[in-house]
């Protein structure tokens, strides 16, 4: 997606916080976070900073780090039209809700139609295809792009297994991929992980 | 009959302005026990028992019922978790003691203009240095709630009792939130306020205990 890197990271980071995420989309539409007047003043001060020792630390950050990020920020595309267009794509993507069997086709079509590179989702699709092959015929599986957003540590597929009993949904298991969780908890590196929890109470009562 | 217990801030501009405010309402404060004594009376009114207290404590004492009313800052009330201020009622915002609680970063952090920048920088900081950014403040509760509402989750509160403006330059914190009326102390300490970093607009307020809300004495303040 033709989006500044910082915006991409921001959207990924806050994907799990629905309210803030829609706030971000609003901001992306209007390019609200760039204040031209302040930028003009600061661009003049940039020269002073460039002449300083680049390794000097200012409140925990090096001068080089500050200068680099400021310049990167200035280079952000300012085209509102693109912001609006991108937001529309994101919103449409989050509306996808289809049977698992159709997922590969629909996602590829979506990416093609919106001129997005499907390279990055190849691995993700592989997993979908694998699941479909293994259990797609045995169970009725729905694929939803907007699902599993409430837990911050999930990084890939998120699943929920349930049955319907007297029009009530009874959750049997929940889980997903959390590839970055270990480092967050203090381990020195990340280990790709997948896990879930089974609701034994419900399972026994079936 | 029980006397009405009133508290006024014990020092500084807030004390002076509070005294003026009372005088305007025909309640002249008399320091009957000497200038340095912390108790006061109101001229020609023997129903009142007055005491000078720290502004923060005034709210605590109204909440626990040992005071009926007092003057303090809105910032201090809001900083208290609701459970510690549930018996305190804001009767009136007063026309003095104006100050804003703001987020400030070193002025040389050119790339940080707003909270969205801060959100981004805080993640980069965590990634690079393996620890969270520290925010020095006298208002940990308000700060935490505000930061989280703006998507900044990678931070740690560094409680401060005073001279908070110095923290980013002594290695004790990376940024601060503090109360400011003109912004000159922040400027003098090489800090700048973030554009959308206004956490709270505060002023002096007249607070009363909920039990005291129907007392006739409050007619003085209408």
Image (cartoon, grey):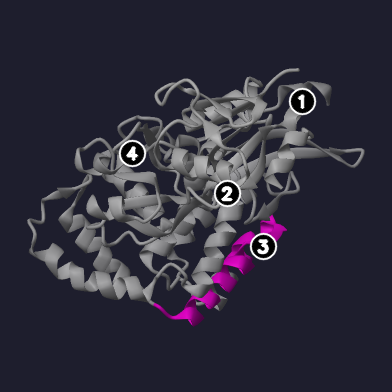
Across and down, in percent, residue B102 comes to 42, 51
Circle 4 is placed at which residue position? B134
| Viewer-side residue, A84 vs B116 | B116
Q: Is residue A70 left or right of residue B63?
A: left
Q: Magenta residues: mostly which secondary structure?
A: helix
Marks 2 and 1: which is nearer the front?
2
Circle 1 is placed at which residue position? A203
What separation in Å lies between label 4 and label 3 (alpha carbons)?
40 Å
Does the magenta run of residues contain A101?
yes
Write the residue at 78% across / 26% down. A202
- SS at mark 1? helix
Q: Give neighbour class at mark 2: few <14, some 14-19, many 20+ (Cα, 10 Å).
A: some
Circle 3 is placed at which residue position? A96
| Viewer-side residue, A199 vs A139 | A199
Residue sticking out furthest to the right: A166
Circle 2 is placed at which residue position? B94
Q: Are marks 3 and 1 on the same chain?
A: yes
Marks 1 and 4: which is nearer the front?
4
Part of the protein shown in magenta = A78-107
Marks 3 and 1: which is nearer the front?
3
- SS at mark 4? strand
Q: Are marks 3 and 1 in contact (CB under 8 Å)?
A: no
- Chain letter of the residue carrying label 3: A
């Amino acid at each position: 997606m033709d989006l500044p890197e910082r915006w991409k990271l921001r959207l990924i980071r806050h994907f799990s916080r629905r309210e803030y995420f829609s706030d971000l989309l609003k901001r992306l539409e209007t390019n609200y976070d760039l204040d031209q007047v302040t930028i003009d003043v600061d661009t003049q001060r940039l020269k002073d900073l460039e002449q300083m020792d680049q390794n000097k630390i200012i409140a925990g950050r090096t001068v080089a780090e500050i200068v680099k990020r400021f310049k990167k920020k200035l280079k952000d595309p300012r085209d509102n039209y693109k912001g609006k267009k991108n937001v529309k794509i994101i919103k449409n993507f989050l509306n996808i809700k289809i049977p698992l069997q159709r997922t590969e086709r629909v996602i590829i079509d979506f990416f093609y139609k919106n001129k997005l590179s499907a390279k990055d989702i190849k691995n993700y699709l592989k997993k979908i295809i694998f699941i479909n092959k293994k259990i797609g015929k045995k169970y009725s599986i729905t694929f939803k792009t907007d699902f599993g957003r409430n837990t911050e540590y999930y990084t890939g597929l998120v699943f929920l297994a349930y049955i319907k009993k007297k029009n009530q949904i009874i959750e049997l298991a929940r889980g997903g991929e959390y590839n970055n969780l270990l480092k967050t908890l203090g381990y020195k590196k990340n280990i790709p992980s997948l896990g879930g929890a089974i609701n034994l109470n419900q399972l026994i009562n079936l | 009959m029980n006397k009405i217990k009133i508290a006024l801030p014990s020092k500084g501009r807030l004390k002076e302005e509070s005294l003026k405010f009372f005088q305007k309402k025909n309640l002249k404060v008399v320091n009957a026990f000497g200038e340095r004594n912390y108790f006061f009376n109101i001229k020609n009114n023997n129903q009142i028992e007055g005491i000078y207290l720290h502004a923060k404590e005034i709210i605590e004492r109204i909440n626990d019922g040992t005071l009926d009313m007092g003057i303090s800052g809105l910032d201090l009330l809001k900083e208290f978790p609701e459970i510690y201020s549930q018996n305190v009622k804001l009767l009136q915002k007063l026309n003095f003691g104006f100050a804003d609680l703001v987020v400030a970063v070193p002025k040389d952090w050119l790339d940080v203009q707003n909270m969205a920048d801060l959100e981004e920088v805080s993640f980069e900081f965590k990634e690079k240095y393996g620890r969270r950014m520290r925010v020095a403040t006298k208002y940990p509760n308000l700060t935490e709630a505000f930061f989280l509402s703006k998507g900044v989750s990678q931070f740690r509160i560094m409680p401060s009792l005073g001279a908070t403006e110095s923290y980013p330059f002594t290695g004790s914190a990376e940024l601060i939130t503090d109360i400011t009326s003109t912004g000159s102390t922040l400027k003098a300490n090489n800090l700048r306020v973030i554009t959308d970093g206004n956490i709270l607009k505060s002023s002096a307020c007249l607070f009363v205990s909920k039990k005291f809300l129907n007392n006739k004495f409050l007619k003085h303040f209408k």
